[in-house]
Each structure stands twice: as C-alpha cells, then as structure tokens.
Image (tube, rainbow, N blue to C red):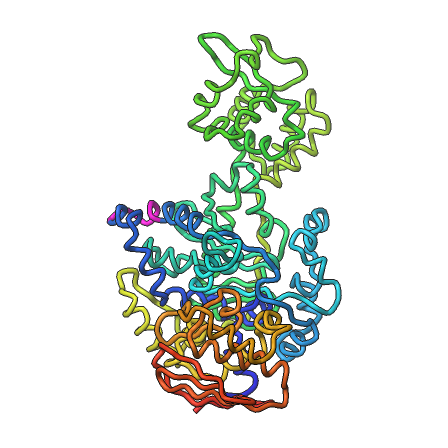
Amino acid sequence: MNQKDLELYSSALTLSDMECFVYPDLMFSLVLANLMSPLIWRWRQEDCFLKLEGKNPWRRLMRLRQYVMDEFEFNLDLTTWGLTRKDVELNRFKDVISPEDIARSNALFGYTGDRYYFDVNIRRHFGLDQYDGDVIPYWKTETVEAMAAFRRKEGYQTGAGECVSLSALYAAAAFIVCDIPLEDIFLILTPLHSQNFIDIQDGVITNNRRLLTKSMWFNGTEISKKAQRALRNEQVTVVTHATGSIHCFYERATIDPAQYQRLDRLLRQYLDAPLTQLNFANFLRSERDYQKYFQFCRHRRGERMFVKSEVLFGYEHGSPYRILDPTFDKLLEEVEEEDFSPYPIEGRLCCEQLGRFLEIEKIDIKNPTDRAKLARFLSPLVPDAEELVRRLVEFLHIDPRLPSPDKKYESVVPIQLQTDWSREQVMDYLESIRSQNLVADLAFYAYRDMTRCRWEPFLKAAMERSPVSIEQSAGLSDQQVYQNLCQMDSESIYEGPRLAQPDEVANFKTGDGIEKAFYLANVLRSRHPDLSMTVDIDEKSVHLQADRDYPFESAKGLRKKILLAPNHYQAD
C-alpha cells in the first residue's frame, strides 16, 4: 500500500475531525460501518421498537429520537482522544489540501466562524481557546461500539458521542430501525458541526441527540436556535450521501448531481417558513426584546381579557403547552387571574390584531413592498419597526451556503441497500462492491474487521495516533504497564474478529489480548523509538516481542505475524 493510500485507509480507523474534513469519503464509510454493526441491529428487538412493528417510518423515527436521547449523551470533552500537533497534521495533508484552506475552515487550526461566532467567542465555547499554540486536540469520531462503551468511562451513565458520531449513528439507525431508505438521508458537515437532512414528510434535521421537524425548527426555542447555528452562520464543507460526496474546496465531486439538486431544493424548502400569526409568536419567543411591545387578547369566560406577551411566554417555561399552537387554550388555563387585564394594555399591539392584518393584506415577507407595509403597521407602537421586520425575515428564512454545484462530477457505483435486507445481506452487498466503490471499501476499515482488511492501516493508526494510552502510562515502568494490562478486563468492545485501537482500550479500560499488545507496543515505541518489535498472533495466544516477551490471551481467533520496525509496519 503506497503512502497516500496508507494515510487514507488509516484515517478510516482514527476518523478524526481533521481526517473527515480532508477525506470526505470517510464520513459515509462510518455510516456503513455502523450499518454493519450488530449492536444497532439488536435495537430492533427492543420492546419500544417491537411495539411499532408495522407502523410507518415517521412513527419509528420519532421513537428513535427518544431512544437515542435515553441511551447517549452529547460529549464535547476535547481531552477524550488526546493531543496532536498542527505541524504534524498539516504535513500529513499537504498533498491533499492547502494549509491555508484548513486554517480558514477548520476550528482546530484557527477557524473562528462568521459574525455570529465572533459574537459568542466560539473557540472559547468549545474550549479551543486553551490550545493557542501548536498543540491541538484530536477530535475523533466514534463508531457506535465506541459510543456505547462510554458507559465504562468515569463520569458517564450512558453511551456518548460528539456531533459527527451522533449524525453517523442517526443515519445508520434510521435505515436499520425505521426503514428509511439510505438515499433519503444526507449528511451535512460544517467546520463546527454535523447534521443530517432526512427526506421524510416536510423534512427532518438531526442535531446531536435531537430531531427537528420543520415546525420545531421555527418554534423560536433555545434548542431550535442552537440547532440552527451551523446552517445560519457557516459554509457547509461537505455533503455526503449514498451516491457520493461533494466538498466546498475540491473540484472533484462524486455525489449524483440530481441527488445534490434534490437536497438543495428540499433543504431550502425546509429552511423557509411563511409569515403567520403562529410564526410571529415563535419570532417573539426567540426575540425577547420585542415582547414588551405586544399583548395577547383572548376570550375568557365570555369576556375579552388581555395579557402581556412576556408574561404569557413566561408561563411556557416548564409547561408542555405553547402559544398559538393547538395547546394554546391549555396554556391559558394555567395563567393566574391576576395576570389578565379586562382592558387593552396601553402602548402594546394585540397579536390577534396583527394576525388579522397579515391575513387581510396577505403579507408576503419576501416582497419588499409588503415588508414596508408591515413596518408601517407596526411603527406606531414598535420603535425602529424596520429593524424588527429585518430580523423577522432572518428568522423565517435561512439561505444555506452549500458547496457550489459547479464541480467535475465523477461517476461512481452508488450504494443501493434495500430496507428489507438483513444485516448479513447488507454486509455481503457491501463486500461485493468494494472494488468498485471506495466508500464501501473504507467502511470495512472503519468497521475494524481484520479478516477483511489489510493490517498496515490499523498498525499505522495504532502506533502513530494513540496519545491517550501513552499519557495514561506516564510514570509507570514498562513492566508496570504490562501488569496493569494483564489485570484489565479482557472483553473487547468490538465483537468477533474486530479490533479496538490502543486509545479505545485506554479510555474504556478493557481489551482483548491483541488489543492490549498493541497498547503496550504503542507505549514502548514512544519510549524506545529505535526498538523493533514483533507481535505473533496465534488464535488464542499473543506474544509481543520487544525488550522481552510479553504474552497475552486472545478470544479473537486471528492468526498474524506483525513486524513493528522504527520506519515501517509489516503484516504476514
């Protein structure tokens, strides 16, 4: 395997934020690795999903949302996968992408985002401000097995994962558990976030553990505002799909142009909402400074009663009911008598009056003439009504900055999976197209099946990108490191002939003997860089030969002889 391919294929094992940015094929390879995972397929046997057997995909998708929220935390701990250096990573990628492009579009290399992110100091928000020098954290994306294994890590009660891990998990689970066709799922990556667009009903966007329907997207809550940040304020770096991918910096694209046009159309429809009385109330929920200019008028016990908008919005906190949606009357029942007034509140516009104006005048917020008409209507009671209208337009419409479609499209064999296939059929199909589809080939490396992959990429990733195991062993002698490994739990987080990387062993405190041997080899290499080592794997036994023999036991049933020389790795 040449050096270029070795970098790519080894990146399918480490799956860092930087690697997914540089190699756009990696993201969907992780989705496919999760599609092959027996762990997600077992979810189908959970009672909550068995009860929905035969129900439509929408019902199951809504149940999947709750399942993911119950089983996984959002993890933004930058120390989980250790540290690397900017110069090391830039040197790795220099023949693929320029350092300047990385620096202006990747948070780990100095990207600070557009206007919004400057305002909120996004680097500090993510904890990146502590890495002002050449040292940066690995920001790795986890397989579903690694996500589930966070239960073993101190401070976690459930599984966990960062945004890219969760988007890959949702894509695979939507196919396996909800029978949503893979071609209806698009993964959208920005420099600071990863989300999915699922073409079902009016569209669904995933955001970390949550799902947002179009009505939820525009409801003006804090959760929705956070979900919108990336698409409102960032250039989309990568879109990836079953037919291929497109990258904002690369001339070459593999995604089917018709599918990309479809996403563009569907996403823009999803990100655009009409001006209705309900959506204006949602706007006020989001823009609290304007609430003091409005009131709500309702009939209560046969009489007209008025309530300040900020008071009514206050009642929403902790309540399942919302203003002007079908639960509005129930919300009004929770309002205390003293908060109602029998008279209009001076200096405030009644939202119902505004609603009638919008209906009668048929205000189209996209029309400059109608925007001016709305501003004139609001101006007697709302200072700088033009600014309110401008912000209202922004609230109701997002123009996503997708990669330009002006690319050189390369036709590739699309990944075509049937929702009624079994896991075995999915794996057999992906195996059958490996020679024709790079993403399918990379998927088996992300999946870690060492009977279906060359070992050199695994060895490179293990020996060059596993800083946590080295840091964890600091202060211990070589023999103490070995003894600690022998006392550690011996169950791999991956079933069958699949192998964890040393830092997965380090983080989750468990590993098969083969995995422990590579953990120790990684530590020894960092301490004795000129030392040549061998790893002899013979089904149930493993021997790491370094300064001495370090024996381990294995349940993986693998056979392989590994040479770990100072300058190269070899597997026979």
Q: Is residue 149 magenta?
A: no
Query: Where is residue 545 drawn, in percent x and y?
Result: 50, 89
The answer to whether residue 12 shows anywhere in this view is no
Q: Is residue 186 visible?
A: yes
On screen, residue 62 versus residue 360, left or right, reads left
Instruction: In the rendered view, tell whether residue 77 sits above or below residue 229.
Output: below
Q: Is residue 56 a member of the stretch shown in magenta?
A: yes
- Looking at the picture, tell me which residue is in the foreground, 539 or 32: 539
Vertical order, 533 against 481 (above or below): below
Which residue is at the far right? 133
| In front of the other: 36 or 202 | 36
Most distant residue in the left direction: 54
> 424 or 557: which is nearer to us?
557
Quarter of the rendering containing residue 93: bottom right
Residue drawn 43% across the image and 26% down it? 327
Q: Compared to 469, does 547 lie above or below?
A: below
Toward which corner of the image does residue 302 lie, by quadrant? top left
Q: How many marks?
A: 0
Where are the magenta residues, as a range?
54-60
In the image, is residue 92 above or below residue 81? below
- For the C terminus, give its image quadrant: bottom left
Where residue 479 appears, x then y in whole percent?
55, 80
Report whether 520 appears left or right of 379.
left
| Residue located at (59% from left, 52% from top) | 230
Q: Percent position (x, y) of residue 134?
A: 73, 69
Left or right: where 544 falls relative to 92: left
